[in-house]
Image (cartoon, rainbow, N blue to C red):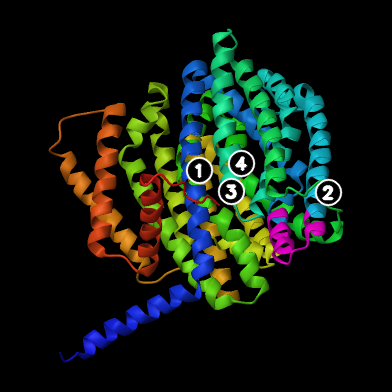
Amino acid sequence: MKSTPGSHATMNAAADETEDFQVCGSEFRRIATGAGTSFAGRIMGGALQFLYTVIVVRFLGAQSFGLFMLGLTIISFVGVLGRLGLEPGLVKFVSAYRGVGDKQRVKGVIVLAMGYSLLASILVGIVLFLMGDPVIARFFDKPQLGGIIKYLAPSLPFLSLMLVALSATQGFQTMKYTVYGQNLFWPVANIALVLLFFLLGFELYGVVAAHVLSVALAAILAVYFVRKCFPDLIQTKAVWDPVQLFRYSVPLLAVVFVYSLLLWTDTLMLGFFRSPEEVGIYNAAMRTALLISLILASFNSIFAPVISDLHNRQEMVKLGRLFKSVTRWVFGISLPVCLLMAFLSEDIMGIFGQEFLSGRVPLLILAFAQMVNAGVGSVAVLLAMSGRQSLVLKHTLLAGLLNLILNWVLIPPFGIVGAAVATATSIITVNVVMLGSVWVLYRIHPYNRQYYKGFLAAVASFGVLFIVNQFLPEMSGVQRILVYSPLFLALCAGFIFGLGFDVEDRFIFNMLAKKLSRKTAGGTPVER
């Protein structure tokens, strides 16, 4: 049979696609496997956090929930200082030292990071405990806030220890311990303790106590996981290199601190300008919108050490190909979630109670910002893990200042809607600027023909859902969520299958099929 020029072009494109995949094969397998574990864990963790929020809101109401969230935001914001920016440095150096078989330096960087962060967090916690009533409560003009800060302060050392220890396990290029400890154990323990304290008659301070005890238990478990990753930790002699660790981490501390300012300025300024009720309503919307970010975070956590490794070996072509693939997956999963959240926004906010329905508009605005965040991919991680952390700091600082100014201007007249607009504008701005920096520095961008398949599938599914909605019987609340969610996801799956898969997508489905067949046959799949 005689071939045509068109068939030659198709065959050549398929060959190039397969060749690209083979070049990135081992790194692709690491990201796909690790991100799958991380994604499943973060989705379950996100569902548990959402359940926790619903339980606390239902018991406390908007006002007390707002006070608790304001106190927790202050603790979390200041607690960033206690971790000294060591988490990404730990992932980078544990991965690098382990890659060359240097166990002594692996131990040294782990012990240094855990020790310094624990000591710094204790000092920060003491300062917060002493400043709760005389300074913080007066500044926000909310007397009850001082007691909440005092009782939350002891959680800081445990929180730092947990996060730093789990970052160490990620340096071993496995996500399962972060999933077990942070995404599953911690929220389950928190929910169980909250319910216990509510049954015992405690309300607001029962929620505070549950938070402190649950994070303490999670910290103990995280340290145990470090031993699981590094069985020779005790016996190995440590080689210390604090200068290198802190030279990398201190600029990132500023990045994380400014990013935290970007993330939490809205809550802090709402607490300053507005009532606790508005803080509570806004935080319910914000925590719901942040569920979209779990998808990007799942890939970032396993992509980060891969970026570090490839950059150290100067394999930039391979890094660019992987960046395209990771961004396409992240956006392809995030966009349907965002559209579904927009379609069901009133029903979702109604789960928290009728007084939370005013959070629908902030939810829509913040969900859009998170979709843009997903659409540009792992730009911040790529810059930081390739030694450009000072550039990330500059970009994030500008976005943080923009966020501060916009919140200051928009919250007094517009309340929670103004806070959402300010935060969304800042998030979109910093992501677009960093995307431009990645292109200028490395001539890498995340977009190709396959990227738009997910976009077309999600938009077409949303259009069909909108039409179907005109013919289905009237529903509301949880019933509407339970009917429309699987329908929309089924539509997305159908359109994606119709548009076809490339070699990387087929690899994921084949890997999943093999795991399922092993389970069906009675085998146990190998877990990273």
Which of the marked residues, 2 or 3, is nearer the chain's N terminus? 2
The residue carrying pointer 3 sits among few (fewer than 14), some (14 to 19) or many (20 or more) residues within 10 Å by Cα, namely many
Stretch in magenta: 90-106
Task: Provide residue 441's location: percent of width, then percent of height.
Answer: 60, 75
Check if residue 484 falls in the magenta segment.
no
Which of the marked residues, 3 or 4, is nearer the chain's N terminus? 4
Amino acid beneath label 3: Asn
Residue identified by numbered label 3: 403
Depth-wise, is mark 2 or mark 3 nearer the camera? 2
Depth-wise, is mark 4 or mark 1 nearer the camera? 1
Residue identified by numbered label 4: 265
Marks 1 and 2, how far apart at CA: 34 Å
Query: In the figure, 396 relative to 118: above or below?
Result: below
Tell me if I can see residue 168 in this picture: yes
Circles 4 and 1, Cβ within 8 Å, touching? The answer is: no
Amino acid beneath label 4: Thr
Which of the marked residues, 4 or 1, is nearer the chain's N terminus? 1
Residue identified by numbered label 1: 42
Marks 4 and 1, how far apart at CA: 24 Å
Q: Nearer the viewer, residue 197 or 345?
A: 197
Task: Provide residue 159's location: percent of width, then percent of height.
Answer: 70, 36
Circles 3 and 4, Cβ within 8 Å, touching? The answer is: yes
Q: Nearer the viewer, residue 342 or 444?
A: 444
Q: Residue at x 61, y 44 (%)?
A: 177
Residue identified by numbered label 2: 235
Q: Residue at x 57, y 56 (%)?
A: 302
Secondary structure under tag 1 reads: helix
Which of the marked residues, 1 or 2, is nearer the chain's N terminus? 1
